[in-house]
Amino acid sequence: MPMAAGTLLYAQSGGVTAVINATAAAVIERARRHGLRVLAGRNGILGVLREELIDTTPLPASTVKRLGQTPGGAFGSCRFKLGSLEADRARYERLIEVLRAHDVRWFLYNGGNDSADTALKVSRIAEEFGYPLTCVGVPKTVDNDLAVTDTCPGFGSAAKYTAVSVREAALDVAAMAETSTKVFVYEAMGRHAGWLAAAAGLAGEGADDAPHIILFPERAFDEAAFFAKVRETVERVGYCVVVASEGIRTADGAFVADAGGGKDAFGHTQLGGVASYLAGRVKDALGYKVHWTLPDYLQRSARHLASATDLEQAVAVGHAAVDYAVKGRNAVMPVIVRKNDRPYRWTVEPAPLADIANHERTMPDDFIREDGYGITEAARRYLQPLIRAEAPPRYGRDGLPRYVQPRLATVPTRLPPFEV
Amino acid sequence: MPMAAGTLLYAQSGGVTAVINATAAAVIERARRHGLRVLAGRNGILGVLREELIDTTPLPASTVKRLGQTPGGAFGSCRFKLGSLEADRARYERLIEVLRAHDVRWFLYNGGNDSADTALKVSRIAEEFGYPLTCVGVPKTVDNDLAVTDTCPGFGSAAKYTAVSVREAALDVAAMAETSTKVFVYEAMGRHAGWLAAAAGLAGEGADDAPHIILFPERAFDEAAFFAKVRETVERVGYCVVVASEGIRTADGAFVADAGGGKDAFGHTQLGGVASYLAGRVKDALGYKVHWTLPDYLQRSARHLASATDLEQAVAVGHAAVDYAVKGRNAVMPVIVRKNDRPYRWTVEPAPLADIANHERTMPDDFIREDGYGITEAARRYLQPLIRAEAPPRYGRDGLPRYVQPRLATVPTRLPPFEV
């Protein structure tokens, strides 16, 4: 491997996952093999703007390894979207100033659509300023909505969590349905695309297996039809397990969650209320005893139930991103390319950030069953490999996973403060 | 082992757990070694009253083994409490009739407080009728509220799920707190006793580790003090993870969960919950961005995260129950007796059902920290061994645990139908 002295900056962006730190650890390990020093933005791009740069050099290899099996985002992430180059010019200029002050030659930004867009813009402004910088996006998101790539690191583990949890809860409901809960509603993340809800479909195979109903944001929610399906299922099977995507909407475009919740202080929609809302409606309309679950962050941080496939891909994109960077492949992202379904074969290849930035991939039409309440064989072929094989973390003698939260020191600042 | 031809009846009762089927499998395996035939009540005691008795004889040993690693209740459970011997005489008589019709000589009832009471009453009425029957209770409950026993099979696994999930979600919150969620609320099962909420305390060790606040039903909920603690935590740590027991009440005895439910403006049922209510209150009062989770059945069916200690105990009480039954030890329950904390040593001993029936064990006072928001070292010593070691189920090539739902046939009825 070629030696290339210099500094690489890595930052995490957006919602974290069970395996984003596996990517981070892979980046650090690979960069060290290239002889690079790795800085990390504290809380993502915010830390770069604020010149809060964590020096990963003091982290022993053993800590980096444990970091790789710790969920969450080790260096902090953020929800912070930069605007257009024109509107947000001062911030882009500040980014270049900070990179220059610390002699950063490679910038790796690990996130979703927005992050790909940011990385692309940083590469453009660096060029404009004549600052030698190679920008590489690194994919991550449990939403699985990035364009070009076959799947997004983080999704497979959340998908496995979803399928396993639904299968387990369904066994519980089945055992109790005679005298207790007859309808159980599981709320899956996914505001615009039903990928995680679809993954729940892997929990069952036969026609009467749970989940009996999946509600996708890609299909308009029709309450009367839903009630009919619930009733028919309870009458035939004895109980009904429903998986609802948080982003389902009625035909007029209104989020169902809004009917059960409210607005936040800024007039923003507060999501997270689909399951409780549907459960309440079923109870009123059909009289069944209901239970519901909102796993929320549990579904995207469940490193204890990571998919080995997902973990492997999270590591692979980390390695590839460093390799691309060192080779000067600017404005690209390592993406997963599927070569075969069964057995699942894939490779990592570079794709232009411009093809990924700000695009959003929803579920193909032929992944959703004709009746709108389940997944097709095509969906199963796509999803199945992504949750395959187990990659449990190491556990301590205390019965808990040996996750780490290392103390992380930032390097001394070299610039005046900047008000973000 | 002595051979004892005859029929043993096993039934499950109340909420199921991740390991109650491990007890069932242990009962079947041990009974087979004694040469007994095992019937199982479909949906617990209801199946006995209705003469819906599953014959476990055709189940191959391999299926019984897989059953032992499947969550839920394989034969069905029920929420159905028999009244006093006087008030419910017809049903008790029917039970004896059914047992007699199928020549059942040993009755094992696997459940919590109520089930211990039912088993005791069945033993009394059998005696009154001169019907030779040995009744043995078998402990089970994620609520951990059975008297006499050191712990209840099912609790350790739910406790491990709770501690692991809180640790994982806390890492997620920590990573995002700068620009996103600052307060996260986890709702734990436990209407009367805070055992599962307490188990969350194992997720952290240092003063600033999550969970930062645990709310126990054993302490009156004081909203103003809670708000102050949340604010102080966010200001010091950057975020605050709260674990709330579903059963917390205000000083006047009102369940906090009830404040979040009710009817909306359209007369629709609003299903409440402690976590969503507290999250809403924190948001309104303190202005922080909040998220919450309601794991619901996920926490008691998470066989994928079972505690090996819990699993071992679930098997041990199954074996002991059969051994006691065969020896004619009537009206007892195998209980876990703790011999030592560190290392954890325990044995199984028989305890009179009369000492267990209808008692409820709440958390000892000295398990809750002085300020009411955390667990003490004494609680830690008690809880820690219960979540220790992992016992993952076998997974299939599809990435899902190899759980089974065998088709279960009932034996032909010998009595006229009975209206329960």
Image: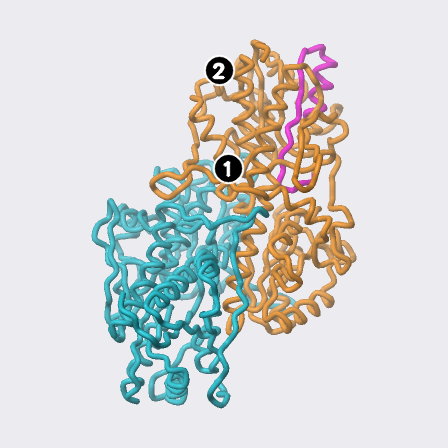
Chain colours: A orange, B cyan
Same-subunit check for callouts 1 and 2? yes
Judging from the image, mark 2 belongs to the subunit labelled: A
Using the numbered discs, state the Cα–Cα distance from disc 1 to disc 2 in whole angstroms: 28 Å
Report x, y in % for residue B142.
39, 60
Q: Find out whether residue B269 is within the magenta segment.
A: no
| Mark drawn on residue A71 | 1
Q: Residue at x 46, y 60 (%)?
A: B67
**Where does the image place residue B243, in percent across and percent down from the top left?**
43, 50
Segment tinted magenta in the rendering: A119-145
Q: Please tell me whether mark 1 sits on a helix, a strand or a loop.
A: loop
SS for dot 2: loop
Q: Quadrant of the N terminus of chain B?
A: bottom left
Q: Amino acid at mark 2?
A: Pro
Q: Chain of mark 1?
A: A
Give, as a three-letter code, the residue at label 1: Pro
Q: Is residue A166 above or below residue B110?
A: above
- In the image, is residue A401 above or below residue B318? above
